[in-house]
Image: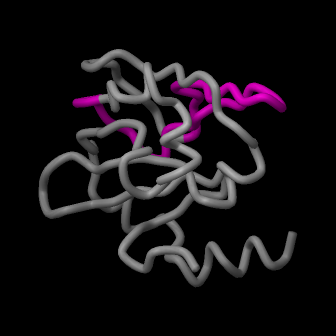
Amino acid sequence: MYPEDLKYTAEHEWVKADGDGPVRIGITDFAQDALGDIVYVQLPDVGSKVRAGDACGELESTKSVSDLFAPVNGTVTAVNESLADQPDLVNTDPYGEGWLLDIEVEDAEEVEALMDAETYQGQLDQS
């Protein structure tokens, strides 16, 4: 159910690492479903430093406002500009066009330490 090529956090973010470049960050299908219809996305500025576990943005839905937590330490290299006009992309394509931001990771081992798809699914099954 969850893409095997991604890593996951307990806060329902996913991380996609492709080689040595920045990692791409988004929220999982579980998270977008729990939030409901997303109407506004606030993301950090490109060039901002983020710390793993710290809030770095917000997702506003028709139900609530939820913090977006940085899954790793690093520097924001890109944000998904499309979400300014189409925040619902997070709902309709959370692993594709609904990505949130890219981060240049300080330590690649942080990514490796995140949950794989099986572990993430197991956490969901327990809650």
**Nearest to the observer: residue 98 or residue 116:** 98
Residue occupying the point 46% across, 29% down = 86
Foreground residue among 43 and 80: 80
What segment is highlighted magenta in the picture?
Answer: 53-78
Query: Which quadrant is the C terminus positioned in?
Result: bottom right
Rendering coords of residue 44 (x, y %): 42, 20
Q: Which x, y percent locates residue 58?
A: 61, 25
Relative to 47, 113 lies left or right: right
Q: Give yes or no for residue 65 being in the magenta stretch.
A: yes
Residue occupying image coordinates x 66% and y 30%? 67
Q: Is residue 70 left or right of residue 12?
A: left
What type of secondary structure mainly makes up the magenta span? strand
Q: Is residue 17 above or below residue 3?
A: above
Q: Quadrant of residue 37?
A: top right
Q: Nearer the viewer, residue 5 or 39?
A: 39
Whether 1 is drawn above or below 27: the answer is below
**Residue placed at 68% from the left, 60% from the top?**
30
Q: List x then y, in percent, for residue 10.
A: 66, 58
**Is residue 20 placed above or below 47 in the rendered structure?**
below
Q: Is residue 68 left or right of residue 83?
A: right
Instruction: Tell me where residue 71 appears, x and y as whole percent.
Output: 49, 46
Quarter of the image holding residue 122? bottom right
Q: Residue furthest left?
A: 20
